[in-house]
Amino acid sequence: LEVLKYTLYVDDGFGVTFTKMMDEKNTQFTVENLEPGTLYSFFVTATNFNSEGPSSEIVTFKSCVKPFSVMAPQLI
């Protein structure tokens, strides 16, 4: 059956509460306003004519931190 939409869920950075972040047919989405250096967990579901299907496996990623102590490039 044709997928009508995908739903992306992300936790609160503490692994407690998952929130719906995306609910559309698009398969690419950027999650913004993440706390730097924090572990976030995600899962996705797909919805077809019948209903929302089972969730994917949960994956966990650590958000990037700003680089520090980076020297300005020098022409040699």
Image (cartoon, grey):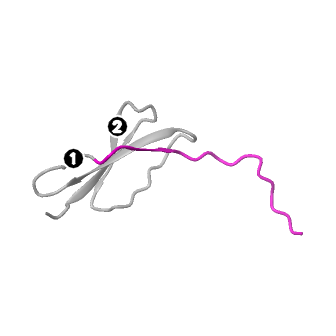
Left or right: where 70 falls relative to 31: right
Q: Is residue 11 magenta?
A: no
From which residue to which does the magenta span run? 56-76
**Badge 1: how crowded within 10 Å, few (<14), some, or many (20+)?**
few
Image coordinates of residue 38 in percent, x first then y, are: 53, 38
Q: State the residue at coordinates (85%, 64%).
A: 74
- Three-letter amino acid code at disc 1? Pro
- Compared to 9, does 14 lie above or below? above
Residue in the picture at 80% in, 58% down: 72
Residue named by callout 1: 54
The image shows residue 10 at horizontal and vertical percentages of: 38, 42
For residue 49, side relative to residue 66 (left or right): left
The reply to whether callout 1 and callout 2 are in contact (CB within 8 Å) is no
Above or below, 47 relative to 41: below
Residue on which the image places disc 2:
18
Q: How would you classify the magenta stretch by its main secondary structure?
A: loop
View extreme (left): residue:
50
